[in-house]
Image (spheres, rainbow, N blue to C red):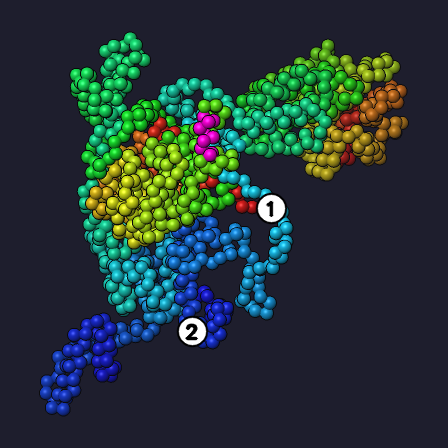
Amino acid sequence: MSIVPKETIEVIAQSIGITNLSPEAALMLAPDVEYRVREIMQEAIKCMRHSKRTTLTASDVDGALNLRNLEPIYGFASGGPIRFRKAIGHRDLFYTDDREVDFKDVIEAPLPKAPLDTDIVCHWLAIEGVQPAIPENAPLEVIRAPAENQIYQQKDGPLIDIRLPVKHVLSKELQLYFQKIAELTMSKSNPSLFKEALVSLASDSGLHPLVPYFTNFIADEVSRGLNDFLLLSNLMHVVRSLLQNPHIHIEPYLHQLMPSVVTCLVSRKLGNRFADNHWELRDFTANLVALICKRFGNTYITLQSRLTKTLVNALLDPKKALTQHYGAIQGLAALGHNVVRLLVLPNLEPYLSLLEPELDAEKQKNQMKSYETWRVYGALLRAAGLCIHDRLKIFPYLPSPSPSFLNKGKGKIINTEPNKRKLSVDSSSTMQVDKPMGDDNPPQNSVQPSSSGQASDGAPESRNAKEKEGSKGRAITMKAILDQVWKNDLDSGRLLVKLHQLYGDRILPFIPSTEMSLFL
Amino acid sequence: MDPEQLDEFVMGYLKKKGFNGAAKQLQEALHNNNNNNGTGSSSSFNSTDYHNDPELTKLIRSFSQSENDPTRYRNGYSNLRSWAYNSLDLYKHELLRVMYPVFIHCYMDLVGKGHTQEARAFFNSFRKDHEMIHLRDLQKLEGVLVPSHLEEMEFARSLRQSKVNIKICQYSYDLLLQYLHRTESTLMLGIINEHINFQVYSGQPNSSSDDIDAVTIVGSFQETADHVNQKEIQWGLLEDSLEDRLEKTGSLLTDSEKGQGESKDGDVDDSNKKRSTEIGKQGSSLKKLKKDKAGNATAKVARQETSTVSPAPRVKSELALPVMSTDVEESILEDLRNRVQLSSVAMPSVSFYTFVNTHNGLNCASISHDGSLVAGGFSDSSIKVWDMAKIGQAGSGALQGESDTNDQVAGPNSRRNYTLLLGHSGPVYSATFSPPGDFVLSSSADTTIRLWSTQLNANLVCYKGHNYPVWDVQFSPFGHYFASCSHDRTARIWSMDRVQPLRIMAGHLSDVDCVQWHPNCNYIATGSSDKTVRLWDVQTGECVRIFIGHRSMVLSLAMSPDGRYMASGDEDGTIMMWDLSTARCITPLMGHNSCVWSLSYSGEGSLLASGSADCTVKLWDVTSSTKLTKAEEKNGNSNRLRSLRTFPTKSTPVHALRFSRRNLLFAAGAISKPTS
């Protein structure tokens, strides 16, 4: 039957004062009511179409009623959705919520803000068939469109006429945005706002036109502000945000950006104050470099090779400062264990022999220098350790190591020194049980020099000598055991042995515990 | 069966079908028969005829049954349906075509007999089959529930009165008839006989299952359409159009450059001067030169015509066209000379005008021919005109004074940068600029059309004539004349100097939603809610073409600059390209998934731009689509090739599009806040 139920007709009849409507009449009226409603809606849809809309509004229905010479229904044109409520006690009866409003309240209420006036904004939706990546355009195909076009142009090469260089016009909004970001980067006074700015840089869609300006800005500031640690750190954060932004097509500007980034990694001096934690900046930048290589390595094949060449050169030049060595090691380590294995490990022995004398506290009087040496030593240890860790992880014989330990170990070793110590305690204490030879050294000391060395420069130097002896003694036994166990993976075995020779027990925390317990 | 009862049935049937004479005769015969029974003389011819024939008795009984049993429709239809769906694949699509008319007539029969409940149930159980193609019709029919609605509703009435033409091959036809006879489904047979007109052809069934003629039920005007479309039309361009003149002057330029060569600037000035004198029909001193050039020009044109594939023929204008002032003509010629040649490899630039803060009130937007003026019609009856050139140069001092005076006209206190035109008393549905941009016409729900001057910022004329909201108004390509269309199902031709329409074009079966002029001004095209597009002769007011094929209301129209083709866009997002001379759809352009509000051809007709409610502007390569042969079309994938580029906007439905004379594409739309 009709979708209008009989009850509705009865309710409507009551509402207009007809109380004695017979059920038959209501039943007869229902289909007709439905037909009329559909008719009105059909007209209303016409009005909607001619208002160039795709949502039907109350005003469209009024328009349709007008077309039929009917009185429009007043009171629904306010625009907001109308809320119907169920009448209590009636199953099918609804009413609109019509609150009583105090006249006084209405008069005394402050005037609402005047709505903004209509205006027209003009922009280029496309220039010669290519959509420019500006904020006014949808960010859908921003990255894909230019690439497509290139292919297209190449295909029809001879047909393309030479175009005059297009003047790059920046909208006022973009200029302001750039200024603001630059200001925040330079000022360092408002870290929370700067964080917001970084989020915006990493996510806004229309920033593409600003990329050349940003690369320029970064290059300029890095070369100018090598003494300003905070500025450099801010700049690197900006670089990272730009790299993260999915709407930005940063590839063409990489060659401008890379020198600045590499500078922040391997520069002799970053910041001028003692308190500046330039190590952290180098670590951050190393990750950044790795990110760039990972993302653009495929398109720029020479990128990684050029980068590693620079870094290895920096590492192997004994004239370079230790800070530079540190940066280079961190950079190489961030590029992955393969890079470390191929480029760092072969040079490990000569390098460590070079470093050895510096490590000795007695010989090294300069505390700063000694600290730096320990830093470099720690970085090398970590790089080599992570490398061997990775090797072992893929070692085919072994049951997969427990991931929780892996993650925990890796993450904490990278980040925080105290945890490193704790970890080493854990792992070494398990070792201790199995060890055939007694150990005169307390196990937690195994990494302590490097860690405490940076926490406070004073204490640990005295221990170094003692430590060395102990580790040498252990190394012999370790070698024997390891050689036996790793007959069938000579490569990894040798590597580990070699590392163990060089580092002693300090490498052990990097070896997953499951493997460790298996081998020992 | 009791013979007397049978007589009654026959009588009732005859009366019901309107054969009153036959009924009377039968009655008399029966009467005689009864009288003669006693005497035992010769029996009645009639009674012996049908009483003794068992086949006939059965048929008569089935007629009587159909009168009172609504389930027969359902059973009959569902049997026929399952038979058709299980038929051979080769003939299936032809047989399925029959299903839709049978379905709607079954439904209407049920409604007509007052079986509302059964009708609704029947409709709902089978509507899925037809929703894909006939959704709009079904939505309309769904509301029909009592017999009186059938009478009232035009669509239903026209369906009842007319027959549907279905092309069907001989074998399918035989299959169908065999089935109907074998199963004795006389009810279905009756419906098919009553409402379907089979055009049986011999040979293999037609493979194209989406033949447009087959799936559209157009009511009574299929034949009229076929008849109308036989008429001859002159789709060529006007003689002595500006393009022609440009070619002439172009040849002049090159000739004179060849001749003199040394001072280029002077040359251009010189030829410009010559042209102006030529146009102004004065300057006797240069007469001799002019003659020379005329010779050159014709030679050049002749050469060009041989080189191009098929030049558009030239026709005479049937209207008295306004005389264009020389400086307007100068500027147009200058634009034409600077026109960028567009093709599938040379895309246009698109400048987008976004309306902000419209509060959902923007009903229409219009862009002047040079793109410098933008008008918006609002639901609060206002029209706002922006001068984009002025906004662009807001800093320059020379224009500052001018804009100040404008502001004073609009209202001394306001600092708004548009001109507000107030006068309508209902939502403004359409606005159009005259070609030079000095006038704006607007149409509104208050049934009037108003003429505004952009120089005076004032209302000049109010044209009253339509009785219902005027949906669309368009200036002719040469100004002065304009066409309007309305909910009152007419389109009208007006001239600016008269308040009464010059012509009224009536014939559409529903609202006329959009109107467009042919480039030669002799025809207008109208798109309607009856899903057809019609072409009308402006001089005679006659309908000269009916284009059938759209499946929903037609919202936008555009004519190709060479006058040969027309594009129309509908509510579903389909764009159709029509050949005006044959009234055939060349190919539908699929791609949009919502209303196509606006269409525009590029200056030389190689590209078509479409703007849609799905927030995109699409560019279509229409040269390739028109060149395609029928064989290529059948290969299928040509549709995708033709969509060249899609430009998505930032949640801005595209209301208006215009290619400027220099082939820059302007688009306009109001940004809609994404509903979260």
Structural crowding at the residue carrying mark 1, measured as other residues with C-alpha within 10 Å and reported as few (<14), some (14–19) or many (≥20): few
Among numbered discs 2 and 1, the one appearing first in the sequence? 2
Residue at 70 percent across and 13 percent down: it is A316
Mark 2 to mark 1: distance in Å? 51 Å
Look at the image and give the residue range highlighted in magenta: B399-408
Image quadrant holding the C terminus of chain A, namely: top right
Dot 1 falls on which chain?
A
Q: Position of residue B583 (x, y in %)?
A: 25, 44
Q: Are marks 2 and 1 in contact (CB under 8 Å)?
A: no
Residue named by callout 2: A25
Which is closer to the viewer, label 2 or label 1?
A: 1
Q: Where, by quadrant of the figure, is residue B372 drawn?
A: top left
Task: Depth check: give the residue in front, B435 or A135.
Answer: B435
Q: Is residue B443 left or right of residue B392?
A: left
Residue under circle 1? A111
- Residue occupying the point 77% across, 13% down: A354
Task: Say what amino acid the circle numbered 2 marks.
Answer: Ala
